[in-house]
Image (spheres, rainbow, N blue to C red):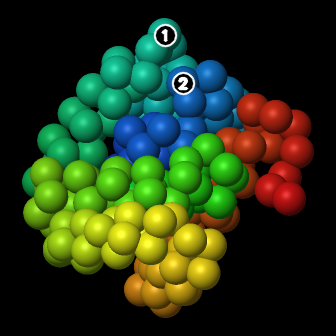
Amino acid sequence: MITLDQTGAMRLWELIDSGLVDGKAAVLWADAQIADHSGLAPAWLVEIALAKHAPAMLAELRAFAYGSHQQPDYRMLESYHVGCLFERYTRGELSWASFLRLAGENADSRDLGVPCEYFYEMLNEIEELEFSLEGETRQRVLVRQRFGEMIGMVQRDYLQFRKLRYGKPLA
């Protein structure tokens, strides 16, 4: 469940930045949260509801989440981002190779505790195996073992947005 605090804002940022949640779903979620908090919603949430594009939402979330004196848990965020990308793969939106490339790029650019080589070595291997289903299945098990807790958290968080955006829960 996405909370209306710094951690929740960072998780929402990751959901949008990863492409798992689009702007429309984020606005629907923000509107629902505002309605639930009858006038006591934080300013950043109102800004999300009024934003017209994902970049504006990300800027507002970043300002709130990283403007605090409290240090974010960067390692949790990196794993959460991997969970977001994995969910996109699970939905069929990304191929396995695309998941590995994006996860590697994210780990490389952020240097937040997950070595980019973890993903890039898997990508090299799956390319050498000519993208075999057997290789993909074996690698998917390894990723689930390492990031299973965050993948589960992302799936639970995403359910809120999916219900609002599409009117149905996860299959």
Asked if 16 appears above or below 117 in the picture, the reply is: above
Tell me which amino acid carries mark 2.
Gly
Please, what secondary structure does the residue beneath circle 1 have? loop
Q: Looking at the image, can residue 72 be seen?
A: no
Structural distance between the alpha carbons of marks 1 and 2: 8 Å
| Residue displayed at 47% across by 46% down | 15
Residue 55 in the image: x percent, y percent? 34, 21
Quarter-of-image position of residue 147: bottom left
Q: Looking at the image, can residue 61 be seen?
A: yes
Say which residue label 1 marks. 52
Q: Point out which mark residue 139 bears.
A: none
Quarter-of-image position of residue 162: top right
Quarter of the image that includes the C terminus: bottom right
Tell me which amino acid carries mark 1.
Lys
Residue 150 in the image: x percent, y percent? 48, 73
Q: Which of 6/42 is in front?
A: 6
Q: Which of 152/132 is in front?
A: 132
Residue 145 in the image: x percent, y percent? 49, 89
Q: Which of 142/58 is in front?
A: 142
Residue 107 in the image: x percent, y percent? 22, 61
| Residue displayed at 34% across by 51% down | 102
Q: Earlier in the sequence, mark 1 or mark 2?
A: 2
| Residue displayed at 54% across by 85% down | 138
Say which residue label 2 marks. 23
Q: Which of 68/54 is in front?
A: 54
Q: Are marks 1 and 2 in contact (CB under 8 Å)?
A: yes
Asked if 129 appears above or below 9 in the picture, the reply is: below
Asked if 69 appears above or below 67 in the picture, the reply is: below
Q: Give left or right: position of 3 versus 81.
A: right
Q: Residues within 10 Å of mark 2 (few under 14, many from 20)?
A: many
Please, what secondary structure does the residue beneath circle 2 have? helix
